Image: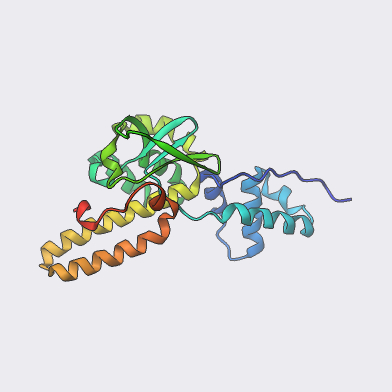
Amino acid sequence: MEKSFELTIPEYLTVQQYMTMNEYRGDSLAGKMLYSISALSGKDIEDVKKLPVSTIHEISKDIQSVASHNNEFYTVIEWEGTLYGYAHIKQSSLGEYIDLENFCKNPERHLHKIAAILYRPITENRFKNLKYTVKQSLKMAKGKVENPFDYYDIEVYDSNKRKTREELFRHFPIHILLGAMAFFLTNANLYLNHIVSLEKNFSQMTRMRLEKKIMESLLPSIGDGSRLFTTFPSPGYYQ
């Protein structure tokens, strides 16, 4: 007699579920599936191993539907009743940049901490009519402005506040965080490209060509976020 197994499929993968799935270091597809089911169900790996193959097969189809969300970048998102804004690198303090750099040395263990840095509560916004699109139970700001970062202020970075909030961010949607990280890393590359061009005396044409490649590499990663909320600024804005 087959043992019953209940699994509630969430609308999106959380940061913690993603980190748990990535704890598996082998190449076996079966091994990856075991970790994925364990992460989604909260069941111990040994209990998942006892499931019949037919059950594993059915669950795998449900997992694929959850894991198929594209990475999306949003500057403003309402999550768990709080309005959060993306912490743009242009306005970063030295403290948050140092913490972010340290956590990125081993991101798979610190994704919840990275999320708590990149998204912080909005303390003031200057949007005239802030409207939302609801997707996977998340409320993302929609509409188009040239540079949304100029329209809101977020909580000043404080490592102690981040420590108290980072556990909450274990439940943050991973596809939103990955989109934000792609956006952050691309901005960092733009800054580095600009600095190198000054030191190496690159021609303006060469610098613009490199920046165009960087921007093109970013666009597939940010998904609906760029279309729904912001007209993507030109590279010159970040310099």
Q: Can the viewer see residue 35 in this picture?
A: no
Q: How many marks?
A: 0
Answer left or right for 165 relative to 53: left
150 or 44: which is nearer to us? 150
The correct choice, above or below, for 115 with respect to 235 in the image is above
Tell me residue 194's x, y (percent).
18, 60
The chosen color scheme is rainbow
The correct choice, above or below, for 183 with respect to 91 in the image is below
Tell me residue 164's x, y (percent).
42, 30
Residue 155 found in image quarter: top left
Residue at far right of view: 1
What residue is shown at x 65% (from left), y 48% (from top)?
A: 38
Q: Can the viewer see residue 139 in this picture?
A: yes
234 or 18: which is nearer to us? 234
Residue at far front of view: 129
What residue is shown at x 38% (from left), y 55% (from top)?
A: 182
Tell me residue 157's x, y (percent).
30, 34
Tell me residue 29's x, y (percent).
63, 64
What residue is shown at x 41% (from left), y 61% (from top)?
A: 220
The correct choice, above or below, for 82 with respect to 173 in the image is above
